[in-house]
C-alpha cells in the first residue's frame, strides 16, 4: 500500500507556501521579541543604576497588568494567608 502525498505536505502546493510563510513570519517576530527583551533588560539595568529596586519595578509592572478587582482579591488572599501564618 503506497502512501500518496498529502496536499498539506506537498512542497509544490499552496499549503506548503502558506506554511513556509507562517514559519518565516513567526521567526521574524521571535527575533523582534528577543530584541525587545534585550531592550527591557537594558531599561531595568538603567533603573537599577539610578538606585531603583528592580524587583519592586517588576512587581509594579505585574500589578498594572491586572484590573483593580483582581488586584484587590489577590491582596485580600495574601493578607488572609499572612494572618494565618502570624505574619501580619
Image (tube, grey):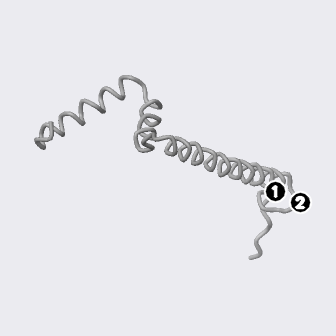
Task: For the residues labelled 1 and 2, say whether their Cβ atoms are less than 8 Å apart.
Answer: yes
**Neighbourhood count class around disc 1 (C-alpha, 10 Å): few under 14, some 14–19, many 20 upward:** some
Residue ranking furthest to the top: 68
Q: Which residue is mark 1?
A: 16
Q: What is the total number of numbered labels drawn onto the structure image?
A: 2
What residue is rendered at 36% in x and 28% in y? Answer: 70
Q: CA distance from mark 1 to mark 2?
A: 7 Å
- Quadrant including the N terminus: bottom right
What residue is rendered at 24% in x and 30% in y? Answer: 76
Quadrant assignment, res 69: top left
Q: Nearer the viewer, residue 21 or 3?
A: 21
Could you tell me residue 20's position as x and y percent?
Answer: 80, 55
What residue is rendered at 63% in x and 50% in y? Answer: 38
What residue is rendered at 60% in x and 47% in y? Answer: 42
Secondary structure beneath dot 2 equals loop
Could you tell me residue 66's position as x and y percent?
Answer: 43, 30
- Quadrant including the C terminus: top left
Residue ranking furthest to the right: 12
Q: Is residue 25 left or right of residue 36?
A: right
**Neighbourhood count class around disc 2 (C-alpha, 10 Å): few under 14, some 14–19, many 20 upward:** few
Could you tell me residue 81's position as x and y percent?
Answer: 18, 39
Residue ranking furthest to the bottom: 1
Amino acid at each position: 500500500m503506497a502512501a500518496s502525498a498529502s496536499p498539506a505536505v506537498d512542497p509544490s502546493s499552496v499549503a506548503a507556501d502558506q506554511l513556509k510563510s507562517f514559519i518565516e513570519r513567526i521567526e521574524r517576530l521571535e527575533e523582534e521579541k528577543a530584541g525587545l527583551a534585550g531592550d527591557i533588560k537594558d531599561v531595568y539595568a538603567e533603573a537599577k543604576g539610578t538606585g531603583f529596586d528592580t524587583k519592586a519595578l517588576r512587581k509594579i509592572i505585574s500589578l498594572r497588568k491586572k484590573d483593580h478587582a483582581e488586584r484587590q482579591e489577590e491582596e485580600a488572599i495574601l493578607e488572609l494567608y499572612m494572618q494565618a501564618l502570624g505574619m501580619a
